[in-house]
Amino acid sequence: MALLQISEPGKSQDPHEKRYYIGIDLGTTNSLVAVIKNGSPSILKEDTNNGLLPSIVTYAGDDVFVGDNKKNNESITFRSIKRFLGKNLEDLKKENFYSPCEYLEENNVLRFKVFEKLVTPVEISSEILKHLKNITNETLKGEIAGCVITVPAYFDDTQRQATKDAASLSGLKVLRLLNEPTAAAIAYGLQSKKISKVMVYDLGGGTFDVSILNLNDGIFKVLSTGGNSSLGGDDFDSLLADYIEKTNGLNLDEQNKHNLYLYAKEIKKNLSDSESIKYNLSKIGLNNQDIILTQKEFNLIIKSLVKKTLKISESVLRDANLTIEGIDEIILVGGSTRTPYVKNMVEDFFNKKPLSNINPDNVVAIGASIQADILSGDSNEELLLLDVIPLSLGIETMGDLVEVIIPRNSTIPTSSSKEYTTFKDGQNAMSIHVVQGERDLASDCRSLAKFTVKDIPPMLAGSARINLEFQIDADGILNVSARETSTNKVTEVEVKPTFGISDSEIEQMLKDSFDNAKEDILNRNLNESIVEGERVILSINSALNIDGKDLLNNVEYDEICHARDKLEKSLESEDRETIIGAIKNLENISETYISRRMNSSIQKIMKGKEIKEYN
Ligand code: ADP
Ligand code: MG
């Protein structure tokens, strides 16, 4: 399990060298790195910028530059590379993507033709991470022992894997990937407050994301997410540039249009701090007579875009089955929420003052640094963030049917196993097809991996036992292993698909499954829930045996045992709903316990101890 890979046994720490655990916000428009110094978070800055590193990578000959203003005639510049992570050409074509150079797809991976070389989005992203690593090394003396990198809550398995790959390429050790909205909530210390529903409104440069989190006993779950992947502050800039062009009766060429766009960005930012601003058009070679632009005028220009974000927020609220009154806190994230009109509109719409006292550019990186500090074991705080998997994982069984092994919205990390047998006498191999999705037919789901279990000893049909185990680590990445029980031979695959599921596809897949819910219910059988119930009982029993008495007080211990006994009883009820209810109940009651187990194990690992029970 990935948890164990965090420690490096035998590699002892030089007592003079400080080890740092950093938090990274790898953004579409800007990226930044933060660290906890003397107990409080700080953003690491280069001399040349305010801590925000534009997520722009420029290739010029053999040189690679990260940040802005490195362009020349020969160079190739990549912006918003995050949009490409974990996607194949088919996914991207649906999104109208822009490439600064020729590209091709090889082994299902998109590659850009950068001069003589082929470069993947993962490699380009790793350049940004390398740069952040250099900033860290220059600012702090010591070793970077590990990092937490944030990702959008809707990132699927492939996009998360791609982010981790980029980190490995840059030489960073990832302790954990963390959802961006969760990071924001941690930055505000919400985990230790008595609140439950948090809405995170994140308006960046080119993307809008809104998420609703449920907070329960220090555990965050993403209840729903939504957004628009082509709506952000850059659109404010274009609208403002158009407005200036029109109101001044200009007709600009391409180059001056671009200059005006950059100027509009500057005007917009300045307008965030004052009621009105004077500008002149000398920057685009016109007269330098001052023109006044007021916030009021600007608000009208961006009004429809801001309204759009509120509409989306409303629908995300509906998805979570909540009303405005049900939200305890709203957090503003992203540079574009610095625009006063955005802040005010959100406040008016939700009739609640959003949290915005932490710089919205920094809030995600700060949360990541706090989480990194906690995972390092250096801090006294106990906190674990459980996330959920967005789509169910399962395998194809006879007749194109899907057997779900880990259901959607399961908190991670998690593992689950099932036993399968041969259906022919003497059958010596079995092929396994891993799929992700909510539909009953494998062909309607996303295919993640195929592999074959070989060398099954010849036996009568139905006598071989193949134990198939799915493990999802804390980053949401899946490992599958199959063990033939008579020989104990293990076939293992890290499911590492090279293509991604796009948001809209996830959406579509979820929608399809709701549309087909009736059929789906008919297809599920009672047996499945009994098997699941037994599995849950087994795993809770084995956990309680290991550390139940250490991590729980008597009341908590008894509560869990009581819920387990209830589940045991429900297995005889022959009623699927009763069993599922009892499983849910036990899972809910054990949530805090599981989180304590995870924390104590990570802390032990970070201190270099081995924990056998997690093997
Ligand atoms: P991302 O998460 O997509 O990387 P950021 O959160 O860094 O993006 O937000 C970048 C956006 O914030 C840009 O469109 C930028 O113009 C805008 N922005 C930055 N500072 C301000 C400001 N003071 N007022 C309004 N918008 C701002
Ligand atoms: Mg961001």
Image: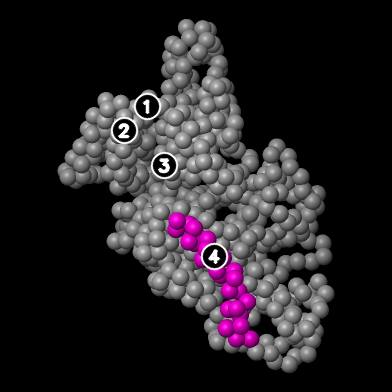
Element type at mark 2: helix
* Kind of residue at badge 3: Ser
Please indicate, yes or no, whether residue 228 appears anywhere in the rendered image.
yes
Residue at the spot 56% in from the left edge and 70% down from the top edge: 306
Picture layout, residue 106 above or below residue 148: above
In the picture of the structure, the residue carrying the numbered disc 4 is 309
In the picture of the structure, the residue carrying the numbered disc 1 is 526
In the picture of the structure, the residue carrying the numbered disc 2 is 579
In the picture of the structure, the residue carrying the numbered disc 3 is 410
Element type at mark 4: helix
Q: Where in the figure is residue 15, as x and y percent of width and height?
A: 41, 55
Q: CA distance from mark 3 to mark 2?
A: 17 Å
| Ligand 2 closer than 8 Å to label 1 CB | no
Front residue (pair 28, 201): 201
Front residue (pair 438, 147): 438
Q: Main secondary structure of the magenta part?
A: helix
Q: CA distance from mark 1 to mark 3?
A: 20 Å
Q: CA distance from mark 4 to mark 2?
A: 41 Å
Judge whether residue 313 is colored magenta. yes
Count of numbered tags: 4
Q: Are marks 2 and 1 in contact (CB under 8 Å)?
A: yes
